[in-house]
Amino acid sequence: MKHYPLDLAQLIEERNFDGIIALIVSKIPVIVSAVLILVIGFTVSNFIGKMVIKALKAKGVDPSIHTFIKTCITLILKFAFILSAISTLGINVSSFLAAIGAAGITAGIGLQSSVSQLASGVQILINHPFKSGDFVELGTVSGKVHEIKLMYTVFVTADNKQVIVPNSTITSGNIINYNANNRRRLDLVYSVAYDQDIETVRSAILNTVHKNNLILTDPKPIVSIKEHGPSSINFACLIWCKSDDYWDVFYYMQEQVKLEFDKQGITIPYNQIDVHINKEN
């Protein structure tokens, strides 16, 4: 039985095809072992990822970051199994890691934007400025948080549009979270004619407020004159409600105050312009 050198490069240089085939055949058990490690490892990683999701749900962790955490864990596990498979093939893992590191630096220079998105995703996960279901405003974008991913966050607008915002945009700008506190204040303004009785108008607005159980009594609702406009007296109505009830209360007040004004005979003025004509003889 012939013995061939184990240096594949030398065999290729010598064009020793019999030796190349013999070397490959001798490595089949090792290759099979490496493939099995990858197959089993990836299967186990995916299974652990599913278990992580179940554990997060059981702990009541914000659903918007479930995918983020699962992806991070499964990627780390898969990378560990890849290193194990490479080690089985007899390749120096240290050299491989050094090569990966060098390639990572090169790729990082060309993918600065993607790296920034990833870093911002981690920052959102750590700082937790919002949670799933929160109504958030980011510059020109406003909507409910649907899901936080590695590179971007998904929002759903009030008219059910899906908006995908890069994570770096979120962390570099102002974030208004309307659900950070359980309560929100509605600042409403109602205009009436100058000849209307102030107490009658105040009572009409407060009666409307007291009829709705979604409006909180603590803090106490405030109805008072805000300003004297060019053609109207403007009343400020400051009321509180739970964050989830904001729009229900808003539309209720807009409709019911008008109906109450009509019932009480309270006039809402139109903009008026007085035109004086001088007649010359």
Image (spheres, rainbow, N blue to C red):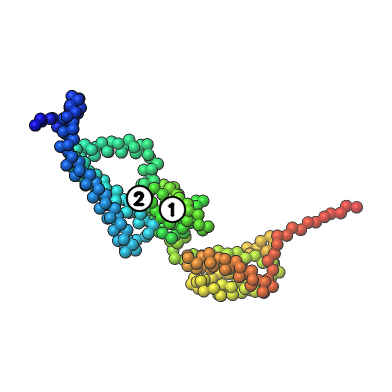
Q: Quadrant of the N terminus?
A: top left
Farthest residue toward the top?
14
Farthest residue toward the right?
281
- The residue singled out by tag 2 in the image is 122
Say whether residue 204 is left or right of residue 195.
left
**What kind of residue is marked 1?**
Val
Give me the disc on residue 76.
Answer: none
Which residue lies at the image location 44% right of the left edge and 65% below the top edge? 182
Question: Which image quadrant for residue 51?
Answer: bottom left
- The residue singled out by tag 1 in the image is 154
Which residue lies at the image location 80% right of the left edge and 56% below the top edge? 276
- Please state the horizontal and vertical placement of residue 61, each as a whole percent of the image: 34, 61
Relative height, residue 157 to residue 193 (above, below): above
Q: In the structure shown, which secondary structural element does the residue marked by tag 1 occupy?
A: strand
Question: Which image quadrant for residue 18?
Answer: top left
| Count of marks, rendered view | 2
Which residue lies at the image location 43% right of the left edge and 50% below the top edge? 170
Say whether residue 145 is left or right of residue 92.
right
Q: Earlier in the sequence, mark 1 or mark 2?
A: 2
Which residue lies at the image location 35% right of the left edge and 50% below the top edge? 122
The reply to whether residue 53 is visible in this rendering is yes
Q: Nearer the viewer, residue 234 or 60?
A: 60
Q: Nearer the viewer, residue 113 or 276?
A: 113
Relative height, residue 90 to residue 269 (above, below): above
Say whether residue 168 is left or right of residue 264.
left
Q: Nearer the viewer, residue 241 or 121?
A: 121
